Amino acid sequence: MNGKTSIVGLLGEHIENSLSPFIHQKYIRYYSLNYCYLPFQVKASLLKSAIIGIKVLGIRGVNVTIPFKEKLNKFIDFIDSSAKEIGAINTIVQKDGKLYGYNTDWTGFRISLVKRIMNDKKNKKAIVLGAGGAAKAVIYALGKEKFSSISIFNRNQQHALEIKERFRRVFPRCIINSFLRYDKNLQEKINQSDIIVNTTPLGSWYFPEQNSLPEDIKLPSRVIVYDLIYYPHRTPLLKMAEENGNVILNGKPMLVYQAAESFYFWTGIQPDGKILNQILEEI
Ligand code: NAP
């Protein structure tokens, strides 16, 4: 580190266990850049001051996580069209004193889907469990990949309805429906689907041993099961699907690919396959 070091980092309220500093330091070292990635733990009430701090201190950029992703719009000078359509920003770049906002969660999900588990995506049907910030990025990616139908199941139906309305306008050809978490249509929709994506925290270390699907659900063996959670490595949902012989994926690839996109926005360097695979093996 010296007087010319560019500072990047992570802005969030509870970030002690985040893997982002580890991943970004790996990218930085691999490319021998004069950058440093730091955690910035910020109370929700101090978001505005933190954003002013980014500008005043000349910080090159930050990743943004819960609970700030959907609260940044009024502080950002230019918002990328995808971030606008999704309604969430997870990456800020500072250039010439102006702040630019992007969403790399959706590209992280999209790349992991394409590279890891699903080559042919046109006219496919998806089930999305949850209707929060991550669900919006996932649904945007599925819409971009020309899925023909997306069924959102969520604890709070109003949240699912809001997402449905948002994306119905962006993807008029995709049939988007919203249901309550335990709606009676769940099994039938699963029977017709090609992929189930869990975007709720059920099964994570906050909610250990909780399955995001009811235990009596039958998974057709051709359905791909993707859980955005990366710790633990196998959630109850993924264990159930693996035992049933389904193709499964956890949230690690999405995390690493979305970080790679943010890194590109700050440095102009797209991390190559070698370092991406190395990090995936290590985390
Ligand atoms: P969020 O905006 O808070 O949304 C959480 C969603 O889960 C909401 O729909 C919420 O339902 C539902 N939910 C929360 N607690 C629940 C419970 N006890 N029972 C049933 N439903 C519940 O959070 P987020 O940003 O979308 O993140 C969600 C998960 O995705 C987290 O585990 C996060 O770590 C993971 N994630 C992973 C990546 C990655 O790169 N792999 C990226 C982003 C997020 P209501 O609408 O009813 O409140």
Image (cartoon, helix red, strand yellow):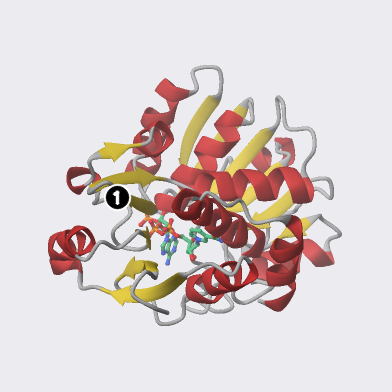
If the image is split into quadrants, where does the C terminus sit? bottom right
The quadrant where ligand 1 appears is: bottom left
Q: Is residue 97 visible?
A: yes
On screen, residue 53 versus residue 213, left or right, reads: left
Residue 279, horizontal then vertical, whole percent: 68, 70
Residue 48, horizontal then vertical, whole percent: 14, 59
Q: Secondary structure at mark 1?
A: loop
Say which residue appears at 56% left-offset and 44% top-offset: 107
Q: Is residue 89 above or below residue 46?
A: above
Q: Is residue 197 above or below residue 212?
A: above
Q: Which residue is under mark 1?
A: 70
Q: Residue furthest top?
A: 173
On screen, residue 126 versus residue 38, left or right, reads: right
Q: Is residue 231 above or below residue 197?
A: below
Amino acid type at circle 1 is Glu
Say which residue appears at 67% left-offset and 39% top-offset: 188
Q: Residue furthest front?
A: 3
Residue 213, horizontal then vertical, whole percent: 60, 59
Q: Tell me the quarter of the picture where residue 163 sits.
A: top left
Q: Residues within 10 Å of mark 1 (few under 14, many from 20)?
A: some
Say which residue appears at 54% left-offset and 59% top-offset: 259
Q: Tell me the quarter of the picture where residue 240 sits.
A: bottom right
Foreground residue, 45 or 228?
45
Q: Residue furthest bottom?
A: 16
Q: Is mark 1 within 8 Å of ligand 1?
A: yes
Q: Is residue 203 visible?
A: no
Foreground residue, 148 or 260?
260
